[in-house]
Image (cartoon, rainbow, N blue to C red):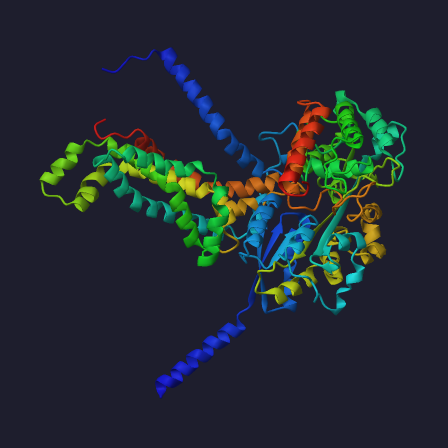
Amino acid sequence: MARAISPRRKWTITVVAWLLGLALFFPILWTVLTSFKTEGEAIASPPSLIAFDWTLANYFEVQARSNYFKYVGNSIVIALGSTLIGLLIAIPAAWAMAFSPTKRTKDVLMWMLSTKMLPPVGVLVPIYLIFRDTGLLDSRTGLIGVLTMINLPIIVWMLYTYFREIPGEILEAARMDGASLAKEIVYVLTPMALPGIASTMLLNIILAWNEAFWTLNLTASNAAPLTAFIAAYSSPEGLFWAKLSAASTLAIAPILIMGWFSQRQLIRGLTFGAVK
Amino acid sequence: MRLKALLLGASFLTASGFAAQAETLTIATVNNGDMIRMQKLTDDFKAKNPDIDLEWVTLEENVLRQRVTTDIATKGGQYDVLTIGTYEVPIWAKQDWLLPLENLGENYDIDDLLPPIRAGLSYEDKLYAAPFYGESSMVMYRTDLFEEAGLEMPEAPTWEFVADAARKITDKENEIYGICLRGKAGWGENMAFLTATANSFGARWFDMEWQPQFDQPEWKETLDFYVNLMNDAGPPGASSNGFNENLALFQSGKCGMWIDATVAASFVTNPDESTVADKVGFALAPDNGLGKRGNWLWAWSLAIPAGTQKAEAAEKFIAWATSKDYLELVAEKEGWANVPPGTRTSLYENPKYLEAAPFAKMTIDSINTADPNNPTVDPVPYVGVQFVAIPEFQGLGTAVGQQFSAALAGQVTVDQALQSAQQLTQREMMKSGYIK
């Protein structure tokens, strides 16, 4: 039986949720607004929210100086490539840990997560040297490899959590019906865990899209993604906020649109459970 | 026979394809006005060198420094031309990470480069980087506020005059602050200003035995002067102000004086950006009568990493970008006021430039009074005016800068900040083997 919520409480929750949502969204809104200001207005104190001379000049300047589509192309290839390869590795791994656990499974999961505890700069030089010697510097292949590796622990952990929600009896039933291991994973487990896999995929795409340390350090011009595009517009000498905001808006636009359209799946995935 | 002919034809076509393929130079650079302008003008270089293509990698200064240092230290070979400053050149040249520039061409006129800048970019009498633009620091002040206060700025002021004037001009109720100075922590932020200022107070980072000198009275005098002045006449929150924050304050009319890079002169006098464009005067950085002024020396310069396979083409590009002809090209396309300053003597003898850039004389005088090889009152074992050209300085400078920024914010006292600076510098210098 559903618990009755008083209208007053409902209102309070709604207002708090809206305020929280606005607070979280405000930096993005401010970036977008600043991108339409002149450099002088961008640093004006007190700043104006909407009462300024709107201009598209920053977007034209950014477009004239940089090949935006090259950077977007690289970001898409790197984010999608690393996510898909990560899922291919992580689904069987998470299956094994969720449905055939051993007494060391928890330790293995912890060990995988511990790789995220090392600051990336600690392994920059060895990875740089490996990339140099294998000709992977400034290549999309190399970046896909690195981003797959660094996001793999998160994918495995998320999938493991989702898979644990699926009752083992359902898989047992499939096995009794004669399904092979591969069929069990592809035809029974995957469709049931699809919301979880989708939200893992979306989160991983966002993480890979925003990753700035490796993408900046291992690329020069050919494989540089949108993080490098943004980094080109910051300056220690001279005003740059408006142009930087225009570049940032262009860089986050694709992922923002993708997130907007897939928010239903994202929420469903995050509250996922086979028997809910 | 036909197959042979086909194969022969195919290999000929492939070979000629390779021959016709242009060599591509990857150039790492920073995002500032002069560099961006150069990128727009490269058609001229391509017309003169059709066999060389240019690929630009523009990054924020700190990102660029980290990126380029990793690449050059590991001989990654991702870049053919690097944009680096006077801090890196002597260190990297000593490590054999850079190639000397010995074939810049007959018309390059290397003797025309400003002597202090050339000295800053040379190691063992060889030029390892060519200056693209150079800068020093100077006083920029509001002529209208000085007039109202009945003050007249001398061409070469003392610190005493500057401090008195700043306190007189300050009108906190109307958000007018007598002086804006850097306070944000960083070796290239507050420490650039404070190290140069300390030079004029007779202070130095190290004595000839590499012993840190923050426990000496000259540093105490410098930091006391700075913190008291900023408390009395500086803007609120000054400990987080760097170049851009002070630029914004000055342009919006809130600073009576601002001591910072000479390159700022073109920003504060630009009516499109500055509300005080027609009310700005310039003076040399102040001194204390000890023979050294508080001005620094910096040059964004182009260098060739030792790992490149395209050294010849890279040197051709550098010769083009730092030549007299390039200055003429910018003048022709964008006007004399937009020519990259601070690299060549001939520019400061050019009447057209002197007319277009009212800050030209003060810029050249400031550059000429900075001596990277002899920066302090007492002798020092290092090169560099606002930095110490040793690899450890980036980390040291920022750590000391954090202490000084905390002193400005009132989180620690001047004595505590100096004591911490002394201890951390001593520790690092012992660890690095400079002192036993």
Q: Is residue A212 visible?
A: no
Farthest residue to the bottom: give it: B1
Q: Which one is nearer the viewer's eye here, B387 or B211?
A: B211
Q: Is residue A131 visible?
A: yes
Rendered location of residue B205, percent (x, y): 74, 38
Rendered location of residue B394, percent (x, y): 64, 41
Q: Is residue A82 above or below residue A136?
A: above
Q: Is residue B18 above or below residue B109?
A: below
Q: Is residue B74 above or below residue A237?
A: below
Q: Residue at x 50, y 34 (%)?
A: A28
Q: Is residue B162 left or right of residue B96?
A: right
Number of marks in picture: 0
Farthest residue to the left: give it: A177
Q: Which one is nearer the viewer's eye here, B38 or B271?
A: B38
Rendered location of residue B322, percent (x, y): 71, 59
Rendered location of residue B227, percent (x, y): 75, 26
Q: Quadrant of residue B223?
A: top right
Q: Residue at x 51, y 29 (%)?
A: A26
Q: Residue at x 39, y 81 (%)?
A: B7
Q: Which one is nearer the viewer's eye here, A69 or A52?
A: A69
Q: Quadrant of residue B126?
A: bottom right
Which quarter of the figure is the N terminus of chain A placed in?
A: top left
Q: Is residue B228 above or below residue B132?
A: above
Which quarter of the figure is the C terminus of chain A placed in?
A: top left
Q: Is residue B120 left or right of residue B77?
A: right
